[in-house]
């Protein structure tokens, strides 16, 4: 059977759930470019509430010692394309990571039926919610996207406020060292306009 698996990952930041779409036949990123394009072009913001999404972000890849930073995870070994993470936001305390994964799988399957870039619509099948060992958000996303998401959820907080809140630091960055390193790279003007 051809298609795609959908897995959801609880993070240390409630309400953020990371959803990953993988090809069924290979451990590679699923082809979701039609969804990314539709989401980016959705000026009326109809898809954001329907899909319960913050957006698509590159998955965090391995650390590159030469560059001194992490790289974006490719869709497949040697691929020039990035494997996207689907960043979702739970609606309320009763919504689970599994609910978020199922929602994406269902909506992406329906969307694929009408998207012109698919030669044959591929189903998106929810596989598993990974909730036993939640990780900080930066385990899944690049630093720039972690900061954008942080600003979305804590728009009124200063960098000093963020660094003083141990739960926020742990949830988004894992450690105070990592949080300070990332936030120190964001100047005050950038912080206010994110």
Image: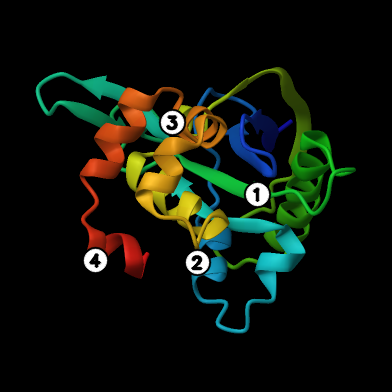
Q: Which mark is residue 88?
A: 1
Which tag is nearer the camera, tag 2 or tag 4? 4
Circle nearer the N terminus (4, 3): 3
Q: Residues within 10 Å of mark 3 (few under 14, many from 20)?
A: many
Nearest the camera: 58 or 172? 172
| Above-or-below relation of 130 to 156 | above
Residue 70 in sight here: yes
Task: Pick whichever of labels 3 and 2 is earlier in the sequence.
Answer: 2
Q: Residue, x 57% and y 31% (percent of image)?
A: 167
Per the model, the C-alpha gap separating discs 3 and 1 is: 18 Å
Q: Relative to 81, is 99 on the left or the right?
A: right
Residue at horizontal 37%, vertical 39%? 142
Residue denoted by label 2: 37
Left or right: 153, with 173 as reference point: right
Q: Earlier in the sequence, mark 3 or mark 1?
A: 1
> Alpha-carbon neighbours of circle 2 within 10 Å: few (<14), some, or many (≥20)?
few
State yes or no: discs 1 and 4 in contact (Cβ < 8 Å). Answer: no
Tell me the mark number nearer the camera, choosing from 1 and 4: 4
Which comes before the other along the chain, label 1 or label 4? 1
Disc 4 versus disc 3: distance between alpha carbons? Answer: 21 Å
Label 1 with label 2: CB-CB less than 8 Å:
no
Q: Nearer the viewer, mark 1 or mark 2?
A: 1
Q: In which quadrant of the rendered view does residue 25 lie?
A: top right
Q: Is residue 25 above or below residue 81?
A: above
């Amino acid at each position: 059977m051809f298609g795609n698996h959908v897995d959801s990952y609880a993070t240390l930041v409630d309400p953020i759930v990371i959803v990953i779409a993988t090809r069924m036949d290979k451990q590679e990123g699923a082809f979701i470019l039609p969804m990314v394009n539709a989401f980016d072009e959705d000026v009326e913001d109809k898809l954001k509430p329907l899909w319960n999404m913050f957006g698509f972000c590159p998955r965090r890849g391995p650390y590159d010692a030469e560059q001194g930073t992490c790289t974006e995870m490719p869709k497949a070994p040697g691929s020039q394309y990035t494997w996207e993470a689907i960043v979702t936001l739970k609606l309320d305390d009763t919504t689970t990571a599994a609910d978020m994964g199922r929602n994406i799988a269902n909506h992406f399957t329906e969307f694929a039926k009408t998207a012109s870039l698919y030669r044959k619509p591929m189903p998106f099948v929810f596989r598993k919610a990974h909730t036993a060992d939640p990780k900080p958000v930066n385990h899944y996303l690049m630093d720039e996207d972690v900061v954008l998401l942080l600003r979305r959820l804590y728009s009124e907080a200063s960098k000093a406020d963020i660094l003083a809140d141990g739960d926020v630091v742990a949830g988004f960055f894992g450690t105070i060292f990592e949080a300070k390193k990332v936030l120190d790279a964001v100047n005050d003007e950038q912080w206010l306009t994110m």
